[in-house]
Amino acid sequence: MVHYVYVVECSDGSLYTGYTTDVGRRIDEHNAGDGAKYTAGRRPVALRYVEYHDSRSAAQRREYRIKNRSREGKERLLPDDPDRVGVDLSWSFSDDQFPAE
């Protein structure tokens, strides 16, 4: 099973980072108000970045690392064009092979 870490931009311009096994379903849940409490009052959300991992533990550790970044650190992951989604395939490493940040 593939596990994803994603970043969405909320309607107020804030960024939310999450983990899922189905990105499309999760974005739909956020936009329906059934996602995280944080995004429920900041709809609609737009997917801005996604990366995949082979294990749940690796994805959740990466989610934690991204959530602890400053806004500027999160923005470095995003493409310059707000209509595009950044996809980083380099994060499909095993748990102990994360590139330096």
Image: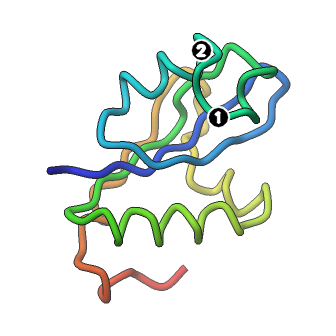
Q: Is residue 21 left or right of residue 48?
A: left
Residue furthest right as drawn: 12
Position of residue 42 relative to residue 85, above or below, is: above
Of residue 34 and residue 62, the one placed in the foreground of this image is: 34
Q: Is mark 1 on a helix, strand or loop?
A: loop
Residue 43 vs 86, above or below: the answer is: above
Q: Quadrant of residue 81?
A: top right
Residue type indicated by callout 2: Asn
Which of the two discs, 1 and 2, labels the residue nearer the N terminus? 2
Residue at the (61%, 26%) spot, across then down: 82
Q: SS class of the residue under badge 2?
A: helix
Placement of 98 over or under 41, stated as above or below: below
Q: In the image, what residue type sits under mark 1?
A: Ala
Q: Which one is in front in this view, the residue at disc 1 or the one at disc 2?
A: 1
* Image quadrant where one finds the C terminus: bottom right
Choose between 64 and 79: the one closer to the eye.
Answer: 64
Residue 87 position, x and y percent, is: 37, 44
Residue name at image x 48 percent, y 85 percent: 100
Q: Name the residue under label 2.
A: 31
Q: What x and y, as percent, mark residue 51? A: 36, 51
Q: Name the residue under label 1.
A: 36
Residue name at image x 31 percent, y 33 percent: 22
Residue 79: x and y in percent read: 54, 41
- State if disc 2 and disc 1 touch (CB < 8 Å): no
Q: In which quarter of the image is residue 23?
A: top left
Q: Where is residue 52 in the image (x, y as percent from the top left)?
A: 30, 53
At 51% from the left and 20% from the top, the residue drawn is: 29
